[in-house]
Structure formats: structure tokens, C-alpha cells
């Protein structure tokens, strides 16, 4: 069991990199991108919850924005949100 836990160690910077390259992105897509989805429903759910934990931490650090759409959790970089606000300001002029 300890071997499985060690194989689930996640580098938060890799998660941020995936989000930055592929936004908006679903938490499951990040888990797949990190190679954590193996086809075992229980282990996959544990891995997705671990990625969700890192989503929450990145959101607290204001590095990403997250939105829950139904049962889906989607994330995008904060820089993109800032660009959207600037675009809205320019569009309003």
C-alpha cells in the first residue's frame, strides 16, 4: 500500500504547467496528463481527489481560478482572468 501512496506524489508545478498550457482544463484531465489514471476506479478517485487538493491550494495562492460546473471542476490561470477583465474594459470604450 505504501508503494501506491509514493507513486501518487504530485509536483504542484507540473499541475500549474498543465493548466497553463491547456486551459480551461478539468481536474480529471490533469490527472490523466500526469499519468495518474490507471483504470482502477478506487485508485483513480483517490488520485483525482489529490489533484483537486492541489487545485484548491493553487486557487488559494491566486495562481488559478476554478469554477464548478455541475459536478465538474474546471481551472484556468489567473493571468487569463486578468486579460478577460482588460478585454471587457476595452470593449466597453
Image (cartoon, grey):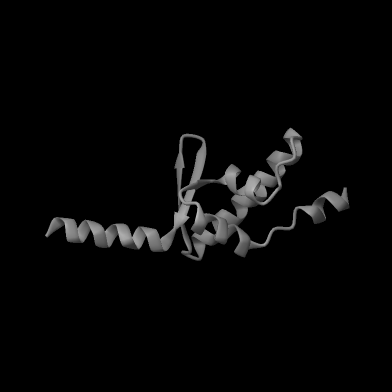
Residue reaching furthest to the front:
21
Q: In which quarter of the image is residue 9?
A: bottom right
> In this rendering, would 17 be left or right of 91?
right
Q: Where is residue 2 drawn, in percent x and y?
A: 87, 52
Residue pictured at 46% horizontal, 34% vertical: 70
> In this rendering, would 52 be left or right of 66?
right
Total marks placed: 0
Residue pictured at 51% horizontal, 38% vertical: 72
Residue reaching furthest to the left:
93
Residue pictured at 75% horizontal, 36% vertical: 42
Residue pictured at 46% horizontal, 48% vertical: 24
Considering only vertical position in the picture, is 55 above or below 74?
A: below
> In this rendering, would 70 be left or right of 56?
left
Q: Where is residue 61 drawn, in percent x and y?
A: 51, 66
Q: Where is residue 14 drawn, in percent x and y?
A: 62, 61
Q: Where is residue 38 drawn, in percent x and y?
A: 75, 40
Considering only vertical position in the picture, is 49 above or below 71?
A: below
Q: Quadrant of the C terminus?
A: bottom left
Q: In which quarter of the image is residue 32?
A: top right
Amino acid at each position: 500500500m505504501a508503494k501506491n501512496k509514493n507513486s501518487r506524489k504530485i509536483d504542484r508545478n507540473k499541475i500549474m504547467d498543465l493548466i497553463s498550457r491547456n486551459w480551461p482544463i478539468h481536474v480529471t484531465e490533469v490527472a490523466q496528463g500526469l499519468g495518474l489514471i490507471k483504470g482502477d476506479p478506487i485508485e483513480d478517485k483517490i488520485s483525482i481527489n489529490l489533484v483537486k487538493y492541489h487545485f484548491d491550494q493553487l486557487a488559494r495562492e491566486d495562481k488559478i481560478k476554478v469554477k464548478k460546473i455541475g459536478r465538474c471542476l474546471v481551472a484556468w490561470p489567473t493571468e487569463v482572468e486578468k486579460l478577460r477583465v482588460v478585454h471587457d474594459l476595452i470593449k466597453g470604450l
